[in-house]
Image (spheres, rainbow, N blue to C red):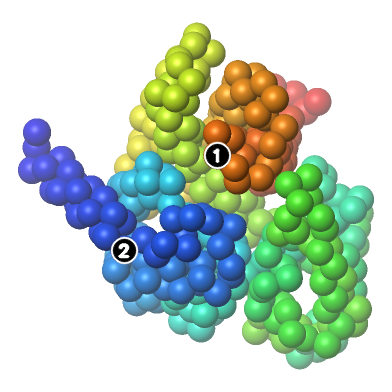
Amino acid sequence: MSREESELEEYRSKVREWIQKNVPEEIKLRGDMAPPDVLRAWQRKIYEAGYLGVSWPKEYGGWGEDPIKEIIVREEFAKAGVPYATVGLGVSVVGPGIILNGTEEQKKKYLKRILTAEDVWCQGFSEPQAGSDLAGIKTKAEDKGDYFVVNGQKIWSSYAHLANYCFLLARTGDVSERHKGLTMLIVDMKSEGVRVSPIKQITGRSEFNTVYFNNVKVPKENVVGKIGEGWKVAVSTLNYERLNIGTILFTVERLIRELSTTMGGNEQLYNIAEEIIALKSFYKRILERIKKGYIAGPEAAVIKLVASEAIQRVYENAMSKMGAESLIMESRPGFRPEIAYGLLASRSITIAGGTSEILRNLLGEVVLGLPKG
């Protein structure tokens, strides 16, 4: 074992020990279903211990460490079955977007507060008539000199009911311009004219929301990137969103291990386990490149695609063995409601960050050079 490998293993042991000693009882019992204030306090504790924002730049509140250490942290939290930065999309989506595209002032103003959970963020991308076809959005940002006036509607905005800010993709050009007429904006969710309507999901929870914008004023200093270059910002943000969604591969790994022990292994689980082993190697290869300055590209779509479909297959496999128990969603002796809940919740994972169909098209066109379908 090299010196670097030895240091990383020592780091892993420290992370594992810290998790064992510091997880609050309510987090142990309820996981990411704990109340928002409990989750925010837990996120801040993780950050103060040095295990959140591991690879984010030091000058903006991060720890400036090797990205490999960040993946070690995520892996150990997943192994422990403990939530990691689950309040809003600030850590997984918005933070990387601002790091890559934001101004110096934006980085200083927002990044550390994302890590400490002082601010909660949502994402305003999809619309009722523009989900898969993101370039077809119609939410309009009209230039009024020092500010924009935003009118429109967004849907499937996770955590918008809790959010302080929205990372909003809006149209500053004509709809016919498609990708060229878009701009990324930071919208204060307390602004006059913003209305949030929760959507009840199949799980019974309401993390998703519809957000309405009625003559909402957004200052020009809230533009991320350049006016008219919102598509570029959106693509880089989506790649990191997919990469972060892809970290469920560590949850899949834990589930396979648990289910093989409690329910017995089978050929399907073993096949999924082999996919996850390969995916972990691929993920670490991407991180090694990021460490050298590489910006995540279509590889993120591979990670997200395989991991999201794998977790669905694992839950389906478990449910097929449970019989009548699979119908019980209550915490009762002898039943495992987390399996039923997990199956329902996993249905959204192949939609978030780009559907599996869209990702297959993307990989076919960008990586394989196939014609547009």
Q: Find disc 1 in the rendering and name its residue.
A: 333
User: Residue at position x 60%, y 29% from top?
Assistant: 315
Indicate whether 246 appears above or below 60.
above
Q: Is residue 76 left or right of residue 193?
A: left
Which mark sits nearer the N-terminus, 2 or 1?
2
Q: Check disc 1: other Cα within 10 Å, few if <14, some if 14-19, many if 20+.
A: few
Work out which residue is located at the far bottom of the displayed protein and give it.
Answer: 146
Q: Amino acid at mark 2?
A: Asn
User: Residue at position x 90%, y 53% from top?
Assistant: 128
User: Residue at position x 53%, y 56% from top?
Assistant: 30
The residue closer to the viewer here, 370 or 83, is: 83
Label ID, residue 22: 2
Q: Is residue 28 visible?
A: yes
Where residue 195 sits in the image (x, y, percent)?
85, 76
Where residue 76 sits in the image (x, y, percent)?
34, 46
User: Residue at position x 44%, y 55% from top?
Assistant: 28
